[in-house]
Image (cartoon, rainbow, N blue to C red):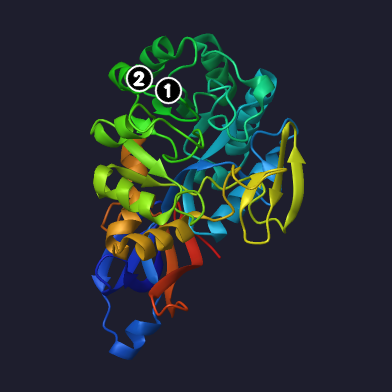
Amino acid sequence: MTTLTARRFDNGEAIRIHFRGKQVASIFPASVSAAELELLPFIAPGMFDIQLNGFNGIWFSSEQLTVAQVEQVIHDYLKQGITRCFPTLITNSAEAIEHGLSVIRQAREKSDVVREVVVGCHVEGPFISAVDGPRGAHPLRHVRPASVAEFRRWQDAAGGLVKLVTLAPESPGAFEFIQQVSATGVVIAIGHTGATSAEIRKAIDCGARLGTHLGNGCSGQVPRHDNVFWPQLADDRLTCSVIADGWHVPAHMLNCILRCKTLSRMILTSDVSGFGGCRPGRYSTGDVSVEVLDDGRIVVAGQTQFLAGSGATTGECVAHLMNICGVTLAEAWPLASSQPAVMMNRAVAGLQEGSPSHFTVFRMKPSTTSDDRSIVSYHPEYSVAGGIVYR
């Protein structure tokens, strides 16, 4: 049995949590002084990110992806406090997508760690808008109509691991795809789209349940009324994921999304790029060419407006939401842990007996900005996944 002593993320109380294998055995209050309490890190249900593209130069979409690379990226995520995730494969050739899914399946079969952390896969594209802007950094030559037959090949390659697909409602065949694939239990998300309000409403009527990284993967200029935002914000059947890294969505829009969707219908994702963790410079993989800028942004190479994934990680997005929207740690954390699990029908980790032993142990360090605002920053200490501690 392993014992951890830390502060609960939701009320700040000191606890001793005992877990045996993959389940929490018991939790008891810990008797500590006020001074000792301040020195303890926080403990929270492990972060669950549904959109992670890779890390440190490794892309899950790469035609050369290897099992060893998958294992390396998963260990990098654990160091950041991410204990469950959906590796995400973006628009690419049919062969490349099937290769990536097959390699991820093989990595799970080989490694207990990968199997514990990787609980599904997200395919973002290739059934998206072909228009510059909505398409984002996805390569144009691989954009194609929605195909249920291709989805079935994905599942064959992945061993049924595809749990989330992002597509554009205006893609030819999208509505039939949504109806048939959502009936299998896979979550369909709307993203990288220039759809009309009517097309978005029809996609939701057909079974779409998520809006992928709302505020991104869209045109730089949209009609004031008939655009991709209003129908997603207004429809309570749709949960929306948001990249709260400080670059993808400006502060006023992040606050508006929160007010429209409320905390109960938002999910935080980092959408971390395969070039997350890389030094500033120009990088490419396959048909994707990007620049990592000095300020941390990752953009489509040759311009600075269109972003190409994030350089931040999930815990940093939690801290940014707290700083910009004035929400507490107890309010923000579930958007990156329990709510993704519920949306994706995965087991919900929690700080109670019998819960899966998935925890993030971290600190939120306070500081003051140049204009005297108090903010916090996220600092991971270690993770627990399936009862194993990773430092």
Q: Are marks 2 and 1 in contact (CB under 8 Å)?
A: yes
Q: Position of residue 302 (x, y in %)?
A: 72, 43
Q: Which one is in front, 350 or 259?
A: 259
Q: CA distance from mark 2 to mark 1?
A: 10 Å
Q: Which one is in front, 223 or 325?
A: 223
Closest to the camera, between mark 2 and mark 1, is 1
Q: Answer whether residue 33 is visible to the viewer in this image.
A: no
Residue 329 falls in image quadrant: bottom left
Q: Position of residue 243 (x, y in %)?
A: 46, 48
Q: Which one is in front, 95 or 215?
A: 215
Q: Which mark is residue 300?
A: none
Residue annotated with mark 1: 195
Number of dots carrying numbers = 2
Q: Amino acid at mark 2?
A: Ala
View extreme (front): residue: 224
Residue 265 falls in image quadrant: top left
Q: Amino acid at mark 1?
A: Ala
Q: Position of residue 235 (x, y in %)?
A: 25, 31
Q: In terms of secondary structure, where does tag 2 sit?
A: helix
In the rendered image, the vertical position of residue 366 relative to residue 171, given as above or below: below
Q: Which one is in front, 40 or 372?
A: 372
Q: In terms of secondary structure, where does tag 1 sit?
A: loop
Characterize the local packing of mark 1: few (<14), some (14-19) or many (20 or more) Cα atoms within 10 angstroms.
many
In the rendered image, the vertical position of residue 43 relative to residue 206, given as above or below: below
The residue located at (28%, 52%) in the rendering is 354
Residue annotated with mark 2: 203
In the rendered image, the vertical position of residue 324 relative to residue 228, given as above or below: below
